[in-house]
């Protein structure tokens, strides 16, 4: 099972002439449907650059209440009008059984399930049931938390309702990182997903991973090197006026340029070594986050000791810690010498942080 199966799968979604065979399959469109004109203009400009499948959110799941939550059924009408006028295929995000029903009633060509919804097995169950009997393509974004079982479980749940056209979409994970990308991609999770379903094509949503238009190229490049089959990407005729996710949207013209950076698989340097390095990078990022968290705790210990007149370094406490670390390293098959050396450094750092507080009292 390989690329050929994935191409056949893609062709089965909307017919053979919708996604070009030589480039990634692309679904694009605004984060939110904002007016009949905006949807129609998006459709025309996307068709002009060869994109035949339009996405637009009509129910917007907002983290905080009170913001713009989409034009709902009215916006579904704008989508169907754009389809009638231009022939573009249309889809939106659904999060409830009622929305699923409305999507069918408006003859949408596909739906997607957002990150917040994939997190809830009850919601997936209800959507699967509401869509049953209609083998409509369902794009399934990863859940907010990096939990492969939850994501894969959602696919299995949907397939129990007879859905065979379920396509996972990597949109990144909310890990509380500061700076850089909006959501950490954790590419290895999609690789694990792929290993479970080798004949299923996979999509990347670079917009919600990057969070900023200027960071899109690096995410798209990565997706191409990792041989993703398609992209779901946000594109707006006038990004600066967008009601949601303005910073990450690009015009269709700009999108065309971005897509030209898709690496040719024949000339790219995608090797297993590349994958291993990616995996190491993810682990190293995690280590760094933990070091930062640990340093914060050392700082609090330092403050407490200073207020209570306790010395920074206490040798009995340290010996006990070293012994515990040694046993733990043995249990997990880690190199005990490395662990010892590492914790000497970490401990020195902790003492230095505490001493610094004492000196600056
Ligand atoms: C979106 O695609 O506009 C969206 C809200 O996606 P996600 O569920 O990935 O946040
Ligand atoms: Mn969005």
Image (spheres, rainbow, N blue to C red):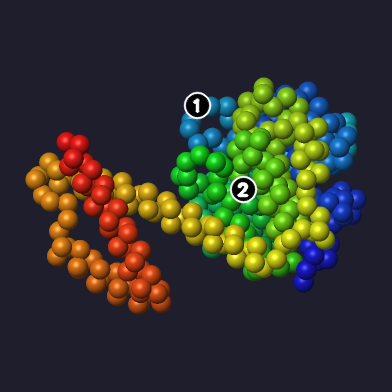
- Farthest residue, direction front: 359
Residue 53 in the figure: left or right of residue 153: right
> Which residue is painted at 63% across and 63% down in the image?
275
| Label 2 neighbour load within 10 Å: few <14, some 14-19, many 20+ | many
Residue 314: percent from left, percent from top: 15, 59
Rendering coords of residue 180 (x, y %)? 55, 41
Seen from the viewer's position, the closer of residues 155 and 266 is 266
Q: Does residue 282 lie above or below 220 as drawn?
A: below
Ligand 1 closer than 8 Å to label 2 CB: yes
Q: Which residue is mark 2?
A: 171
Q: Quadrant of residue 48?
A: top right
- Residue 181 seen: yes
- Among the 4 quarters of the image, the one containing residue 236: top right
Callout 2–callout 1 Cβ contact below 8 Å: no
**Which marked residue is nearer to the observer: mark 2 or mark 1?**
2
* Residue hosting label 1: 66
Q: At x 48% / y 57%, what residue is drawn?
A: 284
- Answer left or right for 334 relative to 117: left
Residue at (57, 55) in percent of width and height: 186
Q: Secondary structure at mark 1?
A: loop
> What percent of the width, then of the height, locates residue 309?
9, 45
Q: Real-space Cα distance between discs 2 and 1?
A: 24 Å
Residue 102 seen anywhere in this rendered image of the structure:
no
On the picture, is 302 further left or further right than 227?
left
Tell me what residue is drawn at x 29 percent, y 75 percent.
327
Identify the disc placed on residue 105: none
Q: Nearer the viewer, residue 341 or 283?
A: 341
Above or below: residue 218 compared with residue 266 = above
At which x and y percent is residue 297?
A: 28, 49
Mark 2 lies on a secondary structure that is: loop
């Amino acid at each position: 099972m390989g690329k050929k199966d994935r191409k056949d799968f893609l062709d089965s979604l909307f017919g053979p002439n919708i996604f070009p065979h030589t480039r990634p399959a692309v679904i694009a469109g605004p984060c939110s449907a904002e007016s009949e004109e905006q949807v129609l203009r998006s459709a025309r400009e996307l068709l002009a650059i060869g994109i035949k499948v339009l996405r637009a959110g009509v129910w917007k799941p907002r983290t905080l209440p009170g913001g713009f939550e989409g034009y709902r059924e009215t916006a579904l009408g704008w989508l169907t009008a754009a389809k009638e006028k231009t022939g573009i295929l249309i889809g939106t995000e659904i999060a409830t059984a009622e929305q699923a029903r409305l999507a069918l009633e408006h003859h949408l060509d596909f739906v997607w399930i957002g990150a917040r919804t994939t997190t809830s097995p009850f919601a997936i169950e209800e959507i699967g049931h509401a869509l049953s009997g209609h083998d409509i393509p369902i794009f399934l974004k990863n859940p907010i938390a990096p939990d492969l079982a939850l994501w894969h479980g959602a696919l299995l749940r949907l397939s129990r309702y007879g859905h065979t056209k379920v396509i996972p979409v990597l949109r990144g994970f909310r890990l509380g990182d500061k700076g850089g990308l909006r959501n950490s991609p954790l590419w290895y999770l999609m690789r694990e997903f792929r290993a479970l379903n080798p004949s299923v094509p996979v999509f990347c949503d670079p917009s919600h991973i990057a969070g900023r238009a200027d960071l899109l190229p690096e995410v798209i490049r990565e997706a191409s090197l990792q041989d993703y089959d398609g992209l779901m990407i946000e594109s707006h005729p006038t990004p600066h006026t967008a009601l949601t996710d303005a910073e990450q949207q690009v015009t269709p013209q700009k999108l065309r340029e971005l897509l030209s950076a898709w690496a040719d698989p024949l000339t790219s340097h995608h090797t297993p070594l590349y994958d291993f390095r990616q995996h190491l990078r993810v682990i190293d990022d995690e280590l760094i986050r933990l070091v930062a968290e640990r340093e914060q705790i050392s700082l609090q210990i330092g403050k407490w000791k200073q207020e209570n007149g306790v010395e920074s370094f206490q040798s009995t406490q340290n010996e006990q810690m070293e012994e515990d670390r040694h046993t733990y390293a043995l249990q997990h098959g880690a190199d005990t010498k490395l662990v010892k050396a590492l914790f000497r450094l970490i401990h020195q750092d902790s003492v230095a942080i505490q001493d610094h507080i004492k000196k600056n009292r």
